[in-house]
Amino acid sequence: MATDSDNAADFSHRLLQLEETVCHDQRLIEELNRVVIGLRLEIERLQNRLQNAERNWGMLDQRVRSHEENLPHEKPPHY
């Protein structure tokens, strides 16, 4: 039969394990939060780059089409 001191020691040991687990989990959550924030910032940066690239592509495409429309539709001299 377990004595009161054995029960108290077991309870104290289990409580210490729970406190260690909670502390470890809190550190892990903080680290994961930093990673998520970093990824969000990277995604925003990449979205801005993509928007700029799409805008530049659209302007370039428009300039090429405008230039093509102004070209005479004649065969080149080597034909």
Image (cartoon, rainbow, N blue to C red):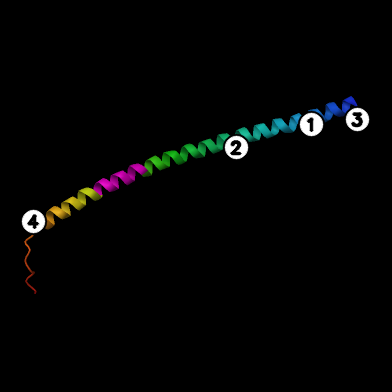
- In the rendered structure, are the residues bearing label 1 and label 2 in contact, judged by CB atoms less than 8 Å apart? no
- Cα gap from disc 3 to disc 2, whole angstroms: 37 Å
Residue at the location (37% across, 41% down)? 45
- Asked if the magenta segment contains residue 52, the reply would be yes
- In the rendered structure, are the residues bearing label 3 and label 1 in contact, judged by CB atoms less than 8 Å apart? no
Q: Which residue is mark 3?
A: 2
Alpha-carbon neighbours of circle 3 within 10 Å: few (<14), some, or many (≥20)? few
Mark 4 or mark 2: whose residue is earlier in sequence = 2
Q: Quadrant of the C terminus?
A: bottom left
Highlighted magenta segment, given as a residue range: 47-56
Q: Which residue is mark 1?
A: 13
Q: Which residue is mark 4?
A: 70
Mark 3 or mark 4: whose residue is earlier in sequence = 3
- Where, by quadrant of the figure, is residue 5 drawn? top right
Q: Between tags 3 and 2, which lies in front?
A: 3
The secondary structure that dominates the magenta segment is helix
Q: Position of residue 77 (x, y in %)?
A: 6, 71
Q: Is residue 24 left or right of residue 72?
A: right
Mark 1 or mark 2: whose residue is earlier in sequence = 1
Q: Could you tell me which secondary element the residue under label 4 belongs to?
A: helix
Q: Between tags 4 and 2, which lies in front?
A: 4
- Cα gap from disc 1 to disc 2, whole angstroms: 23 Å
Q: Between tags 3 and 1, which lies in front?
A: 3
- Asked if the magenta segment contains residue 43, the reply would be no
Q: Is residue 59 left or right of residue 44?
A: left
Say which amino acid is labelled 3.
Ala
- In the rendered structure, are the residues bearing label 3 and label 4 in contact, judged by CB atoms less than 8 Å apart? no
